[in-house]
Amino acid sequence: SAPVETKLIDGKAIAAEVRSEIKKSTAELRAEHNVTPGLAVILVGSRKDSQSYVRNKKKAAEEVGFHTVDIVLPETVSQEDLLFELEKLNSDLKVHAILVQLPLPKHIDEAFVLSKIRVDKDADGFSAENVGNLCMKGGFPPLAVPCTPAGCVELLQRSGVEVSGKNAVVVGRSNIVGMPVSQILQSMDATVTVCHSRTQDMVSYLRNADVVIAAVGKAEYVRGDWLKPGCVVIDVGINAVDDASKKLGYRLVGDVNFAEAQGVAAQITPVPGGVGPMTIAMLLKNTLNLARRSLQLPRIP
Ligand code: NDP
C-alpha cells in the first residue's frame, strides 16, 4: 500500500496546553473558594530517577499555583515511620493529593503502604477502590485516574482520534499503564485486546489495530511492518540505549521503532516528548479534581 503521511502527536505542546488550563482553574478555585490545591510527595531513598521525577512533579505543581509538600525519607526508614508520615498527610487539610514515589525499598510492603493513602487523596488513582470504579460500568466515577493511562487517552482525544468502535491493542498489562489504559479505552467503546509476554502471535493482533498503546518496556520492540497502515500509535516506553555520540552516553527510545513507523502510522507520539510530559499534567489534573471534590465541586473533564 502507498506510504501514509505520518503526523507527530506533540505531547510537550499538548501537556503545556493542559497545564495552562489547570493553572487557570486553580486561580479560579482560589478566587472563588479560597482554596489552593495541595500535592504532597513522599520520596524514600536516593534513586536518581525517582529524585528527578519528584523534582519535575514539584516544579510543575508550583508552576500552576499548587501548594506542595515534600517528605524525603532515608532508604532505611521503617515501614512504621513511613506510615506515620503518610498519616500526617492524610489528616492535613491543606493536602488534597498524596503521591508515594515508587519503587519503595524492598523491606517495605508497597501495596500495604499504597492502601493506606486516603482514597480521596489518592493522587495516582492506584487504590483498589479507584481502579475498581475505573473498571465498573455505570458505577461511581473514580476520584482519580492513573496518570500515564489518562495521559495516553488525553493525547488521543486532543489529536482528534475517535476510538469508539475501533480496535485498540495494548501491549503490556501492568497496574501502572497497560491494565488501566485498556480499561479506559474499553469504557470509551473501543474493542480492546491486551497483549503481554505470553501472547502468541502478537503481530496478528497488531495488524488489526487502529490504535496501538505500547507499554512493554523494551527498546523499539514493535516493528513498523507489524502495524496496520493508518493506525495511531501511543508509545509509552522510555528506554535508555547506549549511544556514544551523546554527551550522557545514551539516548532515550520508545517501545516502538519510530523510524520504521514513519510512512505506516497516521499519527505517532515521539519519545521523548510524547506520553512523558502528559503523565505530570494528569497528576496536576488529579490533584485539582481532588481539591475540587473536597469542596463538592464537579470534576473538570
Ligand atoms: P512493566 O515492566 O511493569 O510491564 C511491562 C508489560 O509488558 C508486562 O505486562 C509484560 O508482560 C509485557 N511484556 C514484556 N515483554 C513482552 C514481550 N516480549 N511481548 C509482549 N509483552 C511483553 O512496565 P510498565 O508498564 O511500568 O512500563 C512500560 C514502559 O513504559 C517502560 O518503558 C516504562 O519506562 C514506561 N513508562 C513510561 C511512563 C511515562 O510517563 N511515559 C510512565 C510509566 C512507565 P507480563 O505481564 O506477562 O510480564
Image (tube, rainbow, N blue to C red):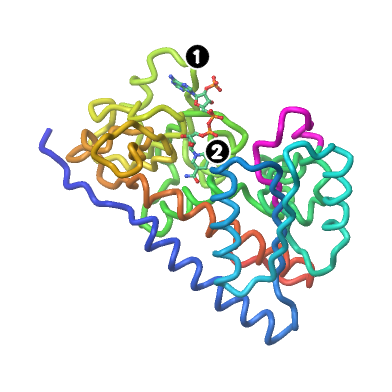
What type is the residue that disc 2 sits on?
Val
Q: Secondary structure at mark 2?
A: loop
**Who's the residue at 84% across and 51% down the image?**
85
**Pointer 2 local density, CA inside 10 Å: few below 14, some 14–19, many at least 20:** many
Instruction: Locate residue 47, reporting x and y percent.
Output: 60, 40
* Mark 1 / mark 2, whichever is N-terminal: 2
**Pointer 1 local density, CA inside 10 Å: few below 14, some 14–19, many at least 20:** few
Q: Secondary structure at mark 1?
A: loop
Corner quadrant of residue 233: top left
* Mark 1 in CB contact with mark 2 (< 8 angstroms): no
Residue position for label 2: 177
**Residue 216 versus residue 42: which sits nearer the camera?**
42
Give the residue furthest to the left.
2
Main SS category, magenta section: loop
Quarter of the C terminus within the rendering = bottom right
Mark drawn on residue 198 = 1
Instruction: Locate residue 219, reporting x and y percent.
Output: 37, 29
Q: Is mark 2 within 8 Å of ligand 1?
A: yes
Corner quadrant of residue 128: top right
Q: Is residue 272 left or right of residue 33?
A: left
**Residue 99 versus residue 160: which sits nearer the camera?**
99
Determine if the magenta segment contains residue 220: no
**Who's the residue at 33% across and 39% down the image?**
251
Magenta region: 99-112
Q: Is mark 1 within 8 Å of ligand 1?
A: yes
**Who's the residue at 50% across and 51% down the image?**
151
Q: Is residue 216 left or right of residue 10?
A: right
**Residue 11 versus residue 81: which sits nearer the camera?**
81
